[in-house]
Image (cartoon, helix red, strand yellow):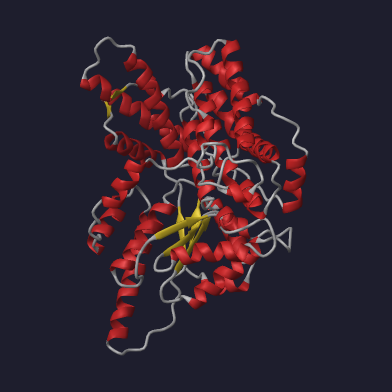
Amino acid sequence: MSQPMTPAAVHKQYDEGMTAFRRQLSDGGARIAFARESDAFMRECACGVWRADQAGVTPLHVEYYNAIYTKGSPVPTALYWELGSAVQDYPGFVLPNFFRRLVQADLENGTRSSRRFVDTFTLMLLLFAAVDGKVSEAEAGFVNRCADSLSRYCDKAGVGGGKTPLDVNDFVARRTDGEPIPTGRPEDEAPAASPAPAPAAEAAKQEAPAQPEETQEELLAQLDELCGLDKVKEDVKGLINLVKVRKLRQEHGLPVPPMSLHLVFMGNPGTGKTTVARLLAKLYHAIGVLSKGQLVEVDRSGLVAGFVGQTALKTQEAVNKALGGVLFIDEAYALANQENANDFGREAIEVILKAMEDHRDDLIVIVAGYTELMGNFINSNPGLESRFNKYFYFEDYDGPQLAEIFRSMCKKNGYTLDETTDKAAAEAFQVMYDRRDENFGNARDVRNVFENAVARQANRVAAMDAPTKEDLMAFTVADLDLEEEPEKA
């Protein structure tokens, strides 16, 4: 049996797959329904997969289950006994309401999103099935039955296209004689059949030459190119100058006062916190503060396990990956559950604090999240207050900045805006900013507008007889669909 994926890797693959599918949905109602309901549905189906296997629930199943959520959605915190009961009591597959909405949207708009979801759904269930390093025949049978139910609903409704060519049986772990591995018999285990990168892609990745390290000047130039963030840029440059002078004083044998380089990033989603953290990690490496300069990004699911004793191991694994670089903890406030004194997030905080002390010369921790919630987080533990004393505040992008981010996305991806379309976009982004609420996604909302425009432009151009290069590149006002309020990320 091969090594199963880590829960953090499962969360990343699930989040990226489901988010990519959601962003392709051009129908606003279907997109909202999918965002609200899909995570709970997929967790229920995971219970069905594990019920079919009849091999019992392990602590790793709990970690997988708690990794099934998309960014910005509630994080599950199931315990071992809770998951065991959910698996045992799984009621059977029920067609989800959001899928009915997908099919309705397909019929209204002539799209095939529901067919694409069957593929996404199948791959995700195979991901869950491989929790023990293999996909059993019983698990594959359950996945097939569920996917067939979705496909039959599409057929009856009249959605174009046919059943997915994906063959679940290709992923079933088999013995050397080609027979499926019986469920629950460790002596017959074979290499895992979970989805893996294509060999050619892996080989290309291994053979790719190492990129030259970026200089301090190049990294600061990248910082300056970021839209807005004037105060953050000033703070970053001041911090780098402070560190450089501190090192020079050390080299000349002069005393240096103690200084913490750990940071708190406060602000709403989509304001560039991760991008700035990545640049800071590289800058720290360029000036000799960190030995590697990599950024390891985690959230609660990447640190906290659902059972006693394993959170410390999971958190330490993340710390080990970050040594020599920056550990970036997004939505860090989720670690401090004020309502539950026994929450495992507190154990993760203690491990992180110890690592900051033990590796003070080669580890920097950046915690990030909403301004008010981050204040509560820092005040929840005296150790956090003493180690995090530098705060960077990321303000919301205003209307002109949102428009500039949109233009940058267009230019980077080979799309053009004429004067009329550019003016209409700028006015719409100003309205977006003026109407912002607590769900305002900043650059994430801009990306949603861009990706939806790409989909609408593709439908428009595909209907042309012989589109020119200019046609393929041009966005129109209709492509932007500016009357529809963009989705909140």
Observer-nearest of 32 and 477: 32
Question: Residue drawn 63% across and 62% down?
Answer: 310
The quadrant in which residue 150 appears is top right
Rendered position, 103 above or below 199: above
**Image vertical order of residue 317 relative to residue 449, above or below:** below
The residue lying at 68 percent from left, 51 percent from top is 77
- Seen at 33% across and 43% down, the residue is 201
Left or right, 93 with reference to 198: right
Res 67 seen here: no
Q: Is residue 44 left or right of residue 394?
A: right
Q: Quadrant of residue 197?
A: top left
Between 197 and 418, the one lying in front of the other is: 197
Question: Camera-side residue: 2 or 423?
Answer: 2
State whether residue 161 appears in this view: yes
User: Residue 371's x, y, as percent?
Assistant: 55, 55
Q: Where is residue 115 shown, x and y percent of the image?
A: 51, 21
Give how far across and how far down residue 98 sits, in percent: 62, 26
Indicate whether 46 appears above or below 386. above
Residue 375 position, x and y percent, is: 58, 61
Q: Judge from the rendering whether residue 282 lies leftward or rightward of residue 146; answer left or right.
A: left
